[in-house]
Image: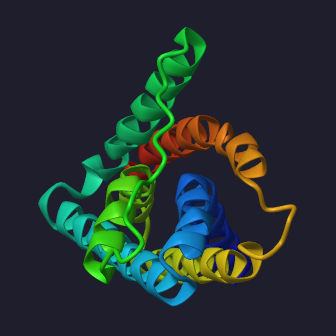
Amino acid sequence: MLDFVLFGISAFMAQILTNLDNLAALLALTLVSGAKRSVFGFLLAQVIVISAALLLALGVEDVVPHWAGYLGIIPLSLGVVALIRRKRGTDSEANPNLETGASIIMVTLLFISLSLDTFAVLAPLLADSAPSFRTAGVIGATLAALSLATVALFGAKAPFMSGALARRLERLVPYVMICAGLYILSNSWTDAV
């Protein structure tokens, strides 16, 4: 039981740390486009990303069951590339720029585009896990998305939730992706036995 809880917590943390850019965008959009529309679009995007990661995990298991762990190369590579870009100073900080009356579809598409790093971490994590652990991972990721939405609803009004705090936390994302990739790769050796 403790294994499932810990795996759920790891998926929760991966979802949180790869969605810090989404949180900054969500906080900004709640001020511009309204809280209900922004939060609904964010949650819809997260449902799509988590579902796509789970579907990919299920598909990979059927096609190449012992090779699923090698998907860990994806988040590992993205994390290393992000660190290299940051070191060179070529990392562009994109701020969402939607008009005030942006539709839920546009908000959802914005958050899907910002969630590719989440997908890159979550899909291999779920693919390299047993079915019962996948359930714990999906629950953890879903709770994380709900937590981020709640933080955005309350945080848009709080003075301490500025863009500076979100940018500082965003610096952790490449390290999280590298650690997730290394975990998935290291766990793939045990699956082959």
Residue 25, compared with residue 148, is above or below; it is above
Q: Is residue 49 above or below residue 131?
A: above
Residue 104 in the image, given as x and y percentages of width and height: 32, 81
Residue furthest out toward the front = 100
**Looking at this view, is 142 or 4 the one in front?**
142
Residue 63 placement, left or right of 126:
left
| Quadrant occupied by the N terminus | bottom right
Q: Residue 86 sits in which quadrant?
A: top right
Q: Total number of numbered labels?
A: 0
In this view, 7 is above or below 80: below
Q: Nearer the viewer, residue 81 or 74?
A: 81
Query: In front here: 122 or 167?
Result: 167
Q: Is residue 88 left or right of residue 74?
A: right
Q: Quadrant of residue 65?
A: bottom left
Q: Residue furthest left?
A: 63
State the residue at coordinates (74%, 78%).
2
Residue found at x 65% / y 44%? 170
- Closer to us: 141 or 46: 46
The residue depicted at 28 percent of the width and 66 percent of the height is 109
* Whole-percent x, y for residue 5 in the image: 69, 78
Taking the view exactly as shown, the residue that stands out farthest to the top is 88
105 lies left or right of 32: left
Most extreme residue toward the right is 160
